[in-house]
Image (tube, grey):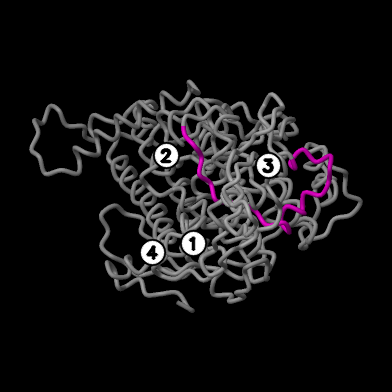
Amino acid sequence: MKRFKMKSFVFTIALTCLFITGCTDLIVPVESEITPSNFPKTEEDFVSVASAVYSSISNKNNNGEAMWLTQELTTDAMILTSNGGRWYDAARWMQLYQHTYDKDNAIVGKAWSWGFSVVSTCNRVLDLFKEAPESTEKTVAIAEIRAVRAYALFTMMDLFGDIPLVTTFGATAAGRTPRAEVCKFIENEVLAAIPDLKSEVSAATYGRPTKWMAYAFLAKLYLNAPVYNGQSKYNEVVNMCDKIITEATQNGTFALSSDYLKMFDIDNGPQIKDFIFAIPYDCNNILGQYFARWWLHEKLQAKYGLPYAPSGATRTIPEFYAKFEDPTDVRKKMWLTGKQYNNDGTPITITTTNKGFDSRYSGPNPSQVITVQLEFTPAIDFRDITKFDTGDDVAGKAVGYRLNKFLPDKNSLTRDQSNDVPVFRYADVLLMKAEAILRGANATQGQTPLSLVNMVRTRAKATLFTSVNLDNLLDERAREFCGEMCRRTDLIRFGKFESAWPFKTNSDPNKRIFPIPATEIALNPLLGQNPGY
């Protein structure tokens, strides 16, 4: 277990008790109350209280995984099929991939719940901080929580367009604020927070907003501004990126970690210089990260020493995998393809029957026992496209290549993993700057889009580009950030979200944003509904 996380866990438990007391009508003796007059005061106090905010981001029961699924499963990178009806789940996964989701889609509803739960928690903590004695610690803590709230609002604005802009705890039901106004509010909040955020990058600030997180955040906001408010802010993107690049160059605070694959292993953390801001996880204490569960085949349990059998039905399509064509690119190793072997080199085998291998078998010996090697095949072969069903036999479960980026956690007794999930990375800063210059920003620091992209490709040990344009830059982003909640936003920004890809033909631009969940409108009719739903 990552030792620095235990402290965070203790803080979370302390605050959970605080909030449970605060939410009840029980009358307790005054001397046992925690009030603004006696808490928080020290930096440790403020971090302890603020831990509820960070817990709300990663909380297993707070639907954080739905946010990841809405960003990944709506793209050409990730397709989740059913196996003989298992994983069909009222077509919720198929709807995301095919862009046929509606106001009743359960994953969309969970994503909404995640975002506004984080916002509400931030508002509550800020309300508690308000009456605390003035101090440097209080000022820093407030800036950090405002930055987190801005990030949650950014994610909800990105997913849902016009959203409620509620910034006070206990506010009454509100309608939605136009997306452009939300975008401006987020920008102002982050700019206002920057002077009070720490510039320190260490285990103590890991997982908390710093000035560098704010700069990366603003670069991302400005890069997507044409989508959010119709404004081009590409020079602003470069300005924000340059602040981080200068820090990296002069002080070595950030860098492209030499081992790309190691960045996503179960022991990643504050030592990863590519991570500017990450969501910490721990398989015992900070739960909610189980990306491997979605991708891993059940017969890989022994290879990875897992106490449970994976049941992943997620694959990628051949057209997306083809982007990893460079044989020297280490990022190609993220994928499980072809015949599968144990760590000692022995084949992973499955004993079954002819009919068990492929239920479509029509030969003379359906019950004949056979032993086959587990082999992932590239094409997605549907037995029933209306149910997104590839079959519940050996062959059906093995179609499609699998992403193994966030390695499974052999130390976990459950599906929970200890791999931290990056939100902003140094590699993204370099590629955002490259893109902004390609879109018209002024080049700075002697860097060009080609030199910036080749910095990332050098770390990946990929063949260097001789030229770069928006198309191959988008492909480079696919290779670098696959599985990191970037693909949907990238496709929308590049005008590719309506493109057809295998088993998806819907070109409705209304699908760029999700519907307001029906359950939320029932609770608050002021929300209304997005166009096309």
Q: Which residue is mark 3?
A: 336
Q: Amino acid at mark 1?
A: Met
Q: Which mark is residue 54?
A: 2
Mark 2–mark 4 distance (CA, rounded to whole Å) = 21 Å
Residue lying at 51% horizontally and 71% vertically, measured from the top left: 100
Question: Considering the numbered disc 4 on the image, is that residue within a helix, a strand or a loop?
Answer: loop
Mark 1–mark 2 distance (CA, rounded to whole Å) = 20 Å
Q: Which mark is residue 164?
A: 4
Q: Nearer the viewer, mark 3 or mark 2?
A: 3
Residue 143 placement: quadrant: top left
Is residue 300 depicted above or below 91 in this figure? above
Q: What are the residue bounds of the magenta stretch? A: 308-332
Q: Which residue is mark 1?
A: 157
Q: Is residue 410 or residue 226 the one in the foreground?
A: 410
Please report whichever mark, 3 or 2, sits nearer to the chain's N-terminal start: 2
Q: Nearer the viewer, mark 3 or mark 1?
A: 3
Q: Is residue 35 or residue 278 the one in the foreground?
A: 278
Q: Residue furthest bottom?
A: 532
Q: Amino acid at mark 3?
A: Leu
Please report whichever mark, 3 or 1, sits nearer to the chain's N-terminal start: 1
